[in-house]
Structure formats: structure tokens, C-alpha cells
Image (tube, rainbow, N blue to C red):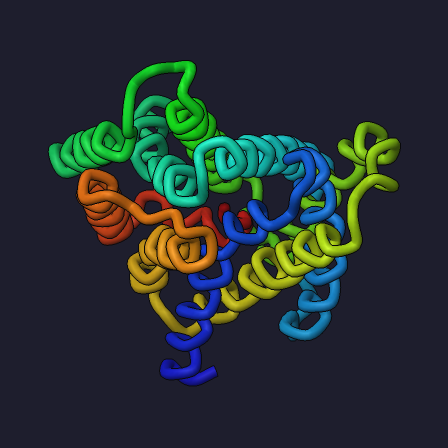
Amino acid sequence: MKERNALLAIHLGALLFGLSGIFGKLADTAPMIITFGRGLFAVIALALFAQLITRTRSVNPNLRQLGMLALGGVLLGTHWITFFHAVQVGGVAIATLGFASFPAFTLLLEGLLFRERIRAQEVLIVGLVCLGLVLVTPSFEFASQATQGLLSAILSGLLFSLLSLLNRVSVKGLDPVKAALCQNLTIVVLLLPFSWPLLAGVKAMDWLWIALLGVFCTGLAHSLFVASLKVLKARTTAVIFALEPVYGIAFAWWLFNEEPGLRMLAGGALIIFAIALSARKGAPVETRPATANP
């Protein structure tokens, strides 16, 4: 893959990841069912893409790595459930921007868990994200749907941050697409007993949105990201992925008339700027190939 094609691939991947909230809102069913379906279709897509883009024989995970990948699947599934709950309660814009707080959590948790010194730039990033979240919130009444949606989205960002840090130590030497396949398979296996009684009530159109979510926003997007990393620097791809909230908010504005106010736009700009800063530092970038976002 040439550099120009890799740049096109990573922009398409960012666009597809940004559409996750859109398809999650279009699918009129419970967040758990959306998560189960997304995982199911992602398993099919990732298995196919693994055959297409994996040229060399990869190392099989050992028992310890399998256990950590399973734990990663639990974190990923819970992250998705809280994210889609935020979409349904607070809207796509609030959910996307709330989730975008994950680089701040990653910087803080890296310092605590790996005993890495927190620099002044990292404190600035966390402060920008916090200020951005304050601006994004229309009101601080817990009973309001916007506040509940934002809190759920922030929890989703925290879970994704924990997943990223877990992958930092669990997927070394493993093919990232196959690692993501294991995590999505864990989601399907764990949610199947709870989802099975409800599957008959899911409408055909909702299955379409869930299938698009799993195949394009998970399987294809993840594979494009991994393929582009073979050509582009990780920091370059991470800066491009800072556009995820922009894509999500733009499509939500177009499709659902979720028009962001000036205060939300200002808060979103601060959060996206903080993401770009964290990407230049390179903190949350190294672990991202084995995850699906959001």
C-alpha cells in the first residue's frame, strides 16, 4: 500500500468509526442487543479480513494472553453498551464527545498503573478535556437526559481507556486483527444467553443497521486502520482519528437535526484539540490497533 492510499484508508476508517453512533441511534433496540449484534457481525468480518490482509503466519496467543483478551472483550462490550446507551439518552454529539475523553483517562491511568511521570503537557490535556466536557453539558441536573448521556459516555471513555492499557501488555507479538477477533468473539459468547430471548423481537431494519455497524464500523474500519499503520506513523493516524467526533456530529446534525450550539462546539473543539495533543505525545496510540472504537 502506497502512502497516498494509506492516507485515504485511514481517513475512511476514521469516518466509519465516527458513524458508530449514527448506526447505534438508527437501530431501535436495546444497547445490549446492538452490542451483541455488532460483535457477531464484527467476528464474521474480522475473520474474513484476517484471511485477506494477513500475509504471514502469526503467533498463537498463550493461555495468559487468551485470558487477557477475554477480559479485553468484557471491557470492550461494556464500553459499547454504555456508549450506545449514551447515544439513545443524550444524542450522538454528546455521546461522541463524552467518549472522546478517553485520552485524558489514558494519560492519568498510565501514570498510576505504569508509574510513568505525568508531564505538564499531560496535565494541560486533562484540563482541556475537563473544560470541554463542562462546556458540552447543557445543564448539570442529574435528572436531565443530556447529563445522564454524558456521564454514560464518559464511563464509556474510561472503559475504553482501560481496554487500551490492557492491550498494551496483552497483545504484544499478536496479530492485531486476530486479537480484535478474539475480543469480539468473547462479547458474542457472553451476551448470547441474555440476548437470545430478545432477538426475535428485533426488526429487520434494525438488523440492517447493526450489520452495517459490525461489518463497516468495526471489521472494515479496524482492518483499514491496521493496514495503514504498516505505511503511516502511528502518531499520524492518531491525529487523523481525532476527526472521529467531527464526523459523528456532522452526520447527526444532517440526519437527526441535532444542531450543536456554540457552547457545545467550543467544548468539542477543546476536546478534539486535546486528542490531537495526546496523539502527538503518542500516549494512547500504541495500543489502539487491537481495539475497536468507539
Q: Picture quarter containing residue 205?
A: bottom right
Q: Picture quarter containing residue 55?
A: bottom right
Q: Can residue 247 be seen in this view?
A: yes
Q: Does residue 168 sit above or below 86 in this rendering? A: below
Q: Does residue 250 sit above or below 106 in this rendering? A: below
Image position, residue 38 (x, y; %): 68, 49
Q: Picture quarter containing residue 43?
A: bottom right
Marker count (numbered): 0
Q: Is residue 117 visible?
A: no
Q: Does residue 214 sit above or below 92 in this rendering? A: below
Image position, residue 188 (x, y; %): 76, 41
Image position, residue 102 (x, y; %): 37, 37
Nearer-the-camera pick, 268 or 283: 268
Residue at position x 48%, y 82% in the image? 1
Residue at position x 28%, y 23% in the image? 139
Image position, residue 47 (x, y; %): 74, 61
Nearer-the-camera pick, 97 or 178: 97
Residue at position x 37%, y 83% in the image? 4
Nearer-the-camera pick, 164 or 66: 164
Residue at the extreme left: 120
Residue at position x 32%, y 49% in the image? 259
On screen, residue 25 versus residue 104, left or right, reads: right
Q: Does residue 51 sit above or below 97 in this rendering? A: below
